[in-house]
Every structure is written in structure tokens, then in C-alpha cells.
Amino acid sequence: MKLSKFNFIVTSVLGVAILSYLVAAFRIRGEAGGMHKSILPMYWADRVAGRDLFDPVEQVWYKGNRQVNEVALTIDDGPHPLSCASLLKTLKEKKVIATFFVVGKQVDGNPDLVRMMVQDGHEIGNHTYDHIRLDGIAREKVYDQISFCDKAVARAAGRNMVLFRPPGMRYNDNVLNVAGQLSKIMVHWTIGAKDFVGTTPDYELTPELKKLPPITPDLIVGYVTKQLKPGAIILLHDNPITAEAMPRIIDEVRKRGYEFRSCKDMLRNLPNPVYITPNQPCGYGLQDPTSSTH
Ligand SMILES: [Zn+2]
């Protein structure tokens, strides 16, 4: 009798533990590493400490607060002369603040569009000067890629940048090191919409991506809405097909109860808040009388 009571307690405790584990594993199924990482004690230690959202040592931001119905809209690879103005118009009409991860050479070619981003209150982040993968190049080249992009935005709009996203999210210790030296916060994404397929050169695409059907506004809206979760960071690209899809993306996201927030505000809403000033005037650029002779 005593033994069977003991058995009952052990079975119940084990049952509750297994059930809690399965529920937790199911809830993180869509995340990078997915259900596999749920068996790692380090994952749970990080999660309890909030380091799975933001790593304060490496200054890497992975995602927003899971308890808040908010998302960040990040738009990479611009400013693009065929789509940026249209994106800015939609964002203004819909009152959405986005974060543009700009490419330095695009900035040099279209400085007026960067000034419009600043005027409209958007955030600007660093996406290197030439949009090259940083994990395969020397440390000095990584430094040049990030700092040349900084200088291009300073020349165009007289602002500095805190947020940084390496092309293809490819980075190693060198990249983390240089990003730290330049006081950057590295920003991941949690929702990709494959909206670069068709506008990105084939050599940058994996064999799986090359097999996908041609991208359409409908597909982009579908990819985004299917992956929505509280605290998501949405990755889209500055290209004409995304500009066409943008009004519906915004409407559909809002219809599902999410608010758009800037990266700055999402960071401030983390369980361990992070405070940044993403684009301070840097006393260089428009107001600088020597800027025309750079
Ligand atoms: Zn990119």
C-alpha cells in the first residue's frame, strides 16, 4: 500500500514534468533551433535570464518581449530608387515607424531618400557598405564595411547609427568584436518573407530558395501573417514587390491584434529593458560645410 502511494506520487511528478516539457517545447517550435534546443539546460538558463531575447555581453538582440503584442518592421538593402519612396509613403499613411537597414553604396547613390527616412521619424541601421558576407573576410575589411556605411549615412543625413545587421545574418567572433568596437547592437529577425527571391542575384540564393515559385505580394503577406508571434522582428526588403505588398501587410498584422513599434521601443519593452538612441545627430554631413568636398 505504501509502495503504491509512492509509485503514484512518482508517476504524477514525472507526468507533470513531461507534460510541461512538451508544452514548452511546442511553444518554441517556430524559433531558431526549434524544439531541439528545448532539451538543452543552457537554453532554459538563458531563457530564465532573458538572454535568449537580448545578449547583454555580445549586444545581440534576438527578439522582443513574448508577453507583448508588438512587432518591429525592418526593411533591408535600401534605399532603392524604385521602391523606397513608395514604402515611405505607405508607412506615413499608415502611421508606422520602421527600421531601414541601409547599404552604404545605396545611401551614397540616393542620399535624399535617407534624409526622407530621418524626416519621417524612421530608424536607420547599418547593413554594411557593399552588402557582402562578413564571416568570410578579414577583421580590417569587416571594420571598413561597417564604418564606411556609418560615414555614408553621416554624409547623407548627419546621423549616426546604433543598430546593425550583417548581410544574411552571417557573423563570427571578428564581426561581433568589430560591432562591439563601433558600439553597435546586432539585430536578428524572427520572420522572413522570402521577398528577396527574384530581386537577389542567383549566386546569393540557396538551392532550396531557387526552387521557390516567383514571389508575389500575396505570398509575402502570407509568409508574414503565418509566422506572427508577440515580440516578432519582421524582415522585409526595399524592393518594388514588397512596396506593393506593404499596405496589406500592415493591415493584416494589425487585424491580428499586433502593434508596430520601433526597435528602440521594442528594446525598451524587454523584461530587462535596453535603452538606445538609434540615430543621434553626429555633427557631420548636411550641416558640415566641408561635406561637399568629401
Ligand atoms: Zn541584406
Image (cartoon, grey):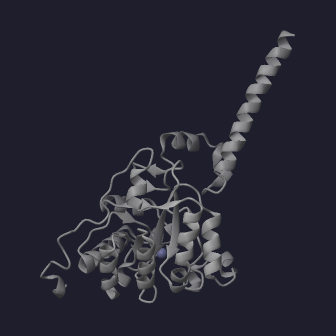
Q: Is residue 97 above or below residue 216?
A: above
Residue at (85, 16) in percent of width and height: 4
Q: Is residue 238 above or below residue 275?
A: below
Hey, which quadrant is residue 160 in on the image? bottom left
Residue 43 spot, x, y in % from top left = 57, 44
Residue 52 spot, x, y in % from top left = 51, 49
Q: Residue furthest right?
A: 1
Q: Residue furthest top?
A: 2
Relative side of 246 to 21, left or right: left
Q: Is residue 162 above or below residue 55?
A: below
Q: Tag count in the figure?
A: 0
Q: Quadrant of the C terminus?
A: bottom left
Residue at (25, 65) in percent of width and height: 280
Relative side of 226 to 2, left or right: left
Q: Is residue 279 above or below residue 102?
A: above
The answer to whether any part of residue 127 appears in the image is no
Hey, which quadrant is residue 208 in on the image? bottom right
Closer to us: 271 or 57: 271
Residue 216 spot, x, y in % from top left = 63, 82
Residue 152 spot, x, y in % from top left = 29, 78
Closer to us: 146 or 287: 287
The answer to whether any part of residue 214 appears in the image is yes
Q: Quadrant of the N terminus?
A: top right
